[in-house]
Image: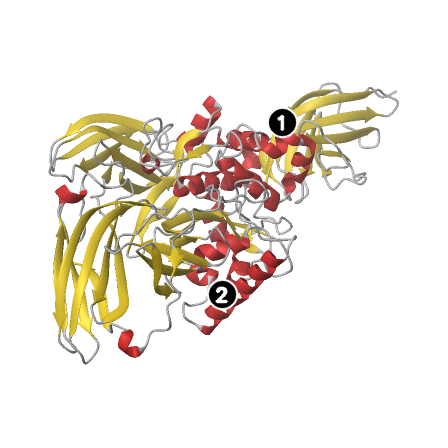
Amino acid sequence: MAQGLELSVTDFQSSQNNMWHHTEEISFDHLIVRRGQAFNITLYFRNRAFEPDLDKIIFVAETGPMPDQAKGTRAVFSLAGRHGPSPWTASLETIRDSRLEVSLYAPPTAPVGRYLLKVHIDSFRGSVTAYQLGEFILLFNPWCSGDTVFLDSEPQRQEYVMNDYGFIYQGNKNWIRPCPWNYGQFEDNIVNICLELLDKSLNFQIDPATDCALRGSPVYISRVVCAMINSNDDKGVLNGNWSENFSDGTNPAEWTGSVAILKQWHSTGQPVRYGQCWVFAAIMCTVMRCLGIPTRVITNFDSGHDTDGNLIIDEYYDHTGRILENKKDTVWNFHVWNECWMARLDLPPGYAGWQVLDSTPQERSNGMFCCGPASVRAIKQGEVDLNYDTAFVFSMVNADCVSWLILGGKEQRLHRDTNSVGNFISTKSIRSDERDDITESYKYEEGSPQERQVFQKALQKLKMGKSQGHYQADSKPSSPMPRRLNSPPLRTCDIIQVSLELQLLDLPNMGQDIKFVLLAINMSRELKDLKVNLSAQSLLHNGSPLPPFWQDTAFINLVPKEAKTHRCQISYSQYSQHLSTDKLIRVSALVEEKSCPEKILVNKIITLVYPAIIINVLGAAIVNQPLSIQVIFSNPLSEQVADCVLTVEGSGLFKKQQRVFIGVLKPQHRASITLKTVPFKSGQRQIQANLRSNKFKDIKGYKDINVDLYV
């Protein structure tokens, strides 16, 4: 009688499997595979060889705390073609002496997560024995055509899944700057932290069995992750802070990567302080790329926040031209979110592809602070009634902006701008450090017939949704605004007919005076006697204004068709004590003429410019060989700065973030330090650096570097 087959040891072939499954960057030692693609394991038996006619081997793969075959979180499948109803399969590869190599396959719809693999061996006339073979991690597979995250472009897969660094665009629409970021999705322990994030979600806490069963859907996973990046409903990763007080945490402008944030959240069990939109989006990009969902970071300049769903952003000004704080609608100078690539089986055909996910806590979606996934194609077509939160995202790129003048407790409408919201929507290019403008994927050209038609279509759908009780903003009602004047239409003689523009004369370097002119051109055939109230105030990047710190009044006389300039200068001493962390200054000019009731408002957003950090790589970069890196930085101010700290990081180059305490930098002083490291991963890498002090928080720099495997 044949002996029962006894298992000795199992080889998961982690190194080889992980290379085939594009997970070798995560680990060589632990099996991490992608669904919809086979992987091989080897079983070693201690007493005899496997005999196909005598031995029956049944595999069991389980995920979650309550595995269930009906829910898809437990799979039972046998070797040699007797698979039963399970979509998981096992097939025989080779038999050699006491070694058996088996190919296992998880279907492209399987829930992602951590799995326990077991085996039952039933020998003919022998006893049934059960063994736990070990754990493995199953991820989404954008290389598999059957997976709902399939992306049919290898360059795009390399950029949106495999690339562990990138740029997040900031500044303003007239001066867009790249902020380097270390996503680090393959760094040590990050995959475990990402799975922990799923297990800390409210969905898992309330119903872990159902939550794990739904983890095969990228739509579901993306909403869970989106809610967990912010801490508003749970103990998520980041606390948001849009004030100017970060004394009990880290100023969002100082972060240069996701790894330090995720590891701090993991080690403390508490939300990390603090984040703003680009930090939320960067962390979500790290998590989604780690899980295998193609993801990119998007910046929208002049981004609307329309809380009442009427596609109108109301802005209020006083008689000096300064913008007044508005607790309701706002225009963010820039706003950052994510796009994730996936099929949308829950929507009508045609809305797959890039989907907007916004983890910055703004409005609730089904009771949670998350936003999306909203189909980019649906946004462009005005299909604002499609899931999820498409109407809110539509308003961020398409809302009209109406300016109001507050006079004597009443509102006077200045103008309605149909193209000021949603500009230069940007993301990093593929295989390049250049910027891609993807505005046309969100909307038709401003002012075109298609753009206005889509706007009216979306507005009609929103009105219909409100009438049926479908639309509801979770924000609190704002304070009553002053009574609006119902002014009659302006006649030709009531229009000033003057063209106005604010123009910078020099690059607005931090520490130097800001020089600009107001250009006024008389477009009429009549004499124009203008009074111009000018003001300057700092802004937070979410549009919140700080008190004005500079004002001026100009009187300009223009004969017909004449052009004149009025020179202005704001000294460093005037703005230095009033700057926000975002270094944004809004200059406004409100123009009036005694003989005309119309008033004209023009404004300009100025982002102050810092000198970049310079990084030099001294010598060839080789894996496991010492490397010296020179970092050159300077104090741009004409005054001493203290508490200077240099932060340097880079996936595959540094095991952890490097912090160098520099102390005091003299006025206009330039200094350098040399860091030593040992690269541990080959390929294209990036070094990110940040210098902070008591006067500024985010002087940044980066350096791309190629690390060779051998000398």
Residue placed under numbered mark 1 in the picture: 135
Query: Is residue 475 in view?
Result: yes
Residue placed under numbered mark 2 in the picture: 455
**Residue at the (59%, 44%) spot, across then down:** 366
Quadrant for the N terminus, please: top right
Q: Position of residue 480 (x, y in %)?
A: 43, 49
Left or right placement of residue 486 versus residue 205 in this view: left
Name the kind of residue labelled 1 in the image: Glu
**Residue at the (71%, 25%) spot, across then down:** 98
Query: Is residue 429 in view?
Result: no
Q: Nearer the viewer, residue 490 or 229?
A: 490
Q: Position of residue 114 (x, y in %)?
A: 61, 31
Q: Position of residue 666 (x, y in %)?
A: 11, 32
Quadrant for the C terminus, please: top left
Q: Position of residue 61 (x, y in %)?
A: 70, 31
Asked if residue 436 is positioned above or below residue 337 in the image, the reply reads below
Q: CA distance from mark 2 to mark 1?
A: 51 Å
**Residue at the (19%, 26%) spot, across then down:** 663
**Residue at the (75%, 32%) spot, across then down:** 68
Q: Quadrant of residue 549?
A: top left
Q: Nearer the viewer, residue 107 or 598?
A: 598
Name the kind of residue labelled 2 in the image: Phe
Q: Classify mark 1: helix, strand or loop.
A: strand
Q: Residues within 10 Å of mark 1 (few under 14, many from 20)?
A: some
Q: Classify mark 2: helix, strand or loop.
A: helix
